[in-house]
Image (cartoon, rainbow, N blue to C red):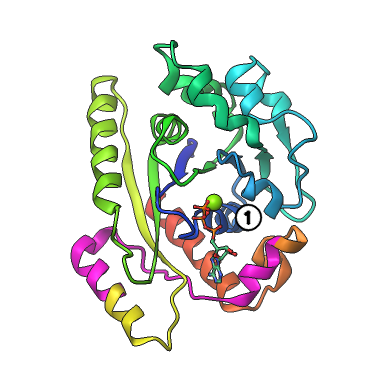
Amino acid sequence: MSCKVIAITNQKGGVGKTTTSVNLADALTRLDKRVLLIDLDPQASASLSLGLDRYEGNTINDVLLDDCDITKAICQPKYSRCDVIISNIELSRLEIKTLDNPNREFLLSERIEKIKNKYDYIIMDCPPSLGIITLNSLYAADSCLIPVQCQFLAIDGLTQLLNTIKIVQKRKKLLGANLQIEGILLTMLDKRVVSSWQIVNEIKECFGEKVFKTIINVNVKAQIAPTVGKPVIAFAARCPAAKQYKDLAKEIVNNND
Ligand SMILES: Nc1ncnc2c1ncn2[C@@H]1O[C@H](COP(=O)(O)OP(=O)(O)OP(=O)(O)O)[C@@H](O)[C@H]1O
Ligand SMILES: [Mg+2]
């Protein structure tokens, strides 16, 4: 199989992008896939969630701005078999530091080219914005996965995101490339709350086939796992969120086989 590059993106904050990036990357390794997780958020939540020190070693910022060889930025977390490229706050200067670079949206897509043969999946955790970092991710990606929280105002902002995706799709087409929608992932469903189900139905009506069958429930284990640097499957293998992230990985592998 060739490498599939997936951007986990939604400019809305706190919808489960990082939790999904980390746990999907980890779950895919358990299906014997070779996986690289790239932390593209200056907040470095994905790096920290896997117990990695954001100030130790090369970061994605060094790769994008300082000509650090990408292979020298790959590290291994203690509790997952995925490889990781960490991030830190320095990445927030990407915007300003590349202002006069006409190639600024393509830095990441160029850099990952030489390592694609090493991986089945590259998962990218995007920041909550539609700025230059997210654009780099969308140009580097084959598809995007959009986490949507099962709560009031869930679809708010989804139109802007889908419009941005459309613009990138058009431009990529001219370059002979593609940007699929891998799927919309419903996250943090509280099964006891009636209004949550209404939102699930609303989103399914709006987006039909694009919505993953797997839904991620609110689960306290998913919340605690990152505080000890573990993916949820390593932390509590039998909890619902662990099973659901395994199901999501299977669903994605099946869709791509
Ligand atoms: N299934 C879940 N059950 C319970 N809590 C969850 C679940 N998924 C995520 N959370 C919690 O919700 C918060 C937001 O999740 P997360 O950091 O993954 O979102 P995000 O979209 O990456 O946020 P940001 O936009 O700030 O990057 C975190 O505190 C996380 O632990
Ligand atoms: Mg995040």
Give the total of numbered labels.
1
Image location of residue 10, percent across then percent down: 40, 50
Camera-side residue of 134 and 216: 134
How crowded is the residue under tag 1: few (<14 C-alpha within 10 Å), some, or many (20+)? many
Camera-side residue of 85 and 87: 87
Camera-side residue of 48 and 118: 48
Task: Say what amino acid the circle numbered 1 marks.
Answer: Asp
Q: Is residue 235 above or below residue 51?
A: below
Q: Horizontal placement of 5 versus 50: left or right?
A: left
Which picture quadrant has residue 239? bottom right
Image location of residue 129, percent across then percent down: 42, 42
Q: Is residue 60 above or below residue 211?
A: above
Q: Is residue 132 above or below residue 81?
A: above
Residue drawn at x 28%, y 22% as measured from the top left: 176
Q: Main secondary structure of the magenta part?
A: helix
Q: Residue furthest left?
A: 205
| Figure quadrant, ligand 1 | bottom right
Residue drawn at x 58%, y 51% as measured from the top left: 25
Q: Is residue 123 magenta?
A: no
Residue drawn at x 53%, y 25% as measured from the top left: 94
Magenta stretch: give its range: 200-226
Residue drawn at x 35%, y 79% as measured from the top left: 196
Q: Horizontal placement of 219 versus 162: left or right?
A: right
**Label 1 near ligand 1 (CB < 8 Å):** no
Q: Is residue 251 above or below residue 216?
A: above
Q: Is residue 218 magenta?
A: yes
Residue, disc 1 = 26
Which picture quadrant has residue 156? bottom left
Image location of residue 8, percent across then percent down: 46, 48
**Element at label 1:** helix
